[in-house]
Image (tube, rainbow, N blue to C red):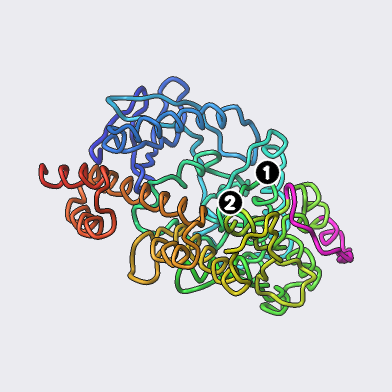
Amino acid sequence: MSDLETIGKYTIEGVLGRGAMGVVYKAFDPNIARAVAVKTIHGNLLSSEMGKEMLERFKTEAQAVGRLTHPNIVGIFDFDQDRGTPYFVMEFVEGKDLKNLIKQGSVFTTDEVIRVTTEILKGLSYTHNLNIVHRDIKPANIFITDKGEVKIADFGIARMDDSELTQVGSVLGTPSYMSPEQCIGAGVDARSDLFSVGTLLYEMLTGKKPFRGEQTNAIIHNVINLKPEPPSQVRKEVPSSFDQIIKKALAKNASQRYQTAADFSADLEKISSGGRVVGKGQKRAVVAGGVVAAFAVIGGLVFTQLPSENDSAVAVAPVAPIAPVVQEDALTTAEREKVARLLDVARAHFLVGRLVSPQGSNAYDAYKMVLGVDDKNLKAKQGMDEVRNRFFKRTKILWLQGEKDEVRRHLVLAEDLFKGESLLDELRERVQGG
């Protein structure tokens, strides 16, 4: 589609960006005489059953996001298909995204940081009141127009971008802006977005991400465990008033964060007015309900709690096991702790796409080690099933994208790991027939 001249009624004027899912074009709407952005999905990704399901999700998201009308949100105007290619029509924003501004070394004044962050929070307050969580707040999705307006992009589409398509490159994408609960695959709510806003605020203040690492799993570990250095200590020009805001925004436990975007904005307003934000004493949170909870469920008996901000230790500590029924062959405490650690490791590998490789450092091997300790562990068995299913879905996507050599490499791995599986037979036939 590189030579695409029109899509639907829209005239293509240029390419704004390309990705694994598709292409974003700058286009012209002749009926209203305005510039728009058109986001497409590669047609070859939609020919399978998985593709049909993906198209339905794409359409559902378009309908949901199309109802959003707010000055701080990039609007969606239309959804349609042309010659087998589904596409969104979105508001065209003239300006730069926050990612490029930070990359160029832009230094934000305190007033600018407060203004940009407050505008982001206004947009999120609107959507959160409609029970819509963005899930992918990051600098690349925040645009500042040539007029200085702040707009949040890719609402709802983020959920789709976290699908199997993003696993093709064997990583989920940088988790530097994800909340701890998002990193461990737990349920998320509005407070997850507010954590992500906290990471943006930190980076605008200091020029550095609060959670860094050379590899994705190292970043995930830091998001879950690390307390970042206060911004005033990273950059001396940053008023210390921001330290408490950052501490609260980046609390590991969602119950100790800002509960609403309005609360977050109110504290920023205090600083803008020359006041200070003072931290309140907090009781150690109990894992329950909406609190960031299970890190891993071990046979339905053990879970690990994300650390409270009042804990002196940063590392995640295992909660005492709950055993409603004591059996003769119950695991020892040491074995339960080993299983807990291995399940945590397996889940982290799974989330960053390390399904079956590299050898000895992947989700499959970690789950296998769990079963070596506890051969009845349901969590590990379910994890093995998830690994297998995602592995074979990945091969289908790679095949559709024409990555046949990569699929052949996957087949070699599958022959060793998934003997006797019907999915292996299908993969083998596909490779032999291609």
* Vertical order, 62 against 24 (above or below): above
Q: How far apart are the two marked residues, 1 and 2, measured between alpha carbons?
A: 10 Å
Name which residue lies at 32% across and 49% down.
Answer: 394
- The amino acid type of the residue labelled 1 equals Leu
* Vertical order, 204 against 1 (above or below): below
421 and 290: which is toward the camera: 421
Q: What SS does tag 2 mark?
A: loop
Q: Residue 352, image x and y in percent?
A: 44, 60
141 and 55: which is toward the camera: 55
Q: Quadrant of residue 301?
A: bottom right
Q: What SS does tag 1 mark?
A: helix
Q: Is residue 269 left or right of residue 227?
A: right
- Residue 270: in magenta span: yes
- Identify the mark at residue 137; answer none if there is no mark: 2
Q: Are marks 1 and 2 in contact (CB under 8 Å)?
A: yes
Task: Please provide the residue range marked out in magenta.
Answer: 269-290
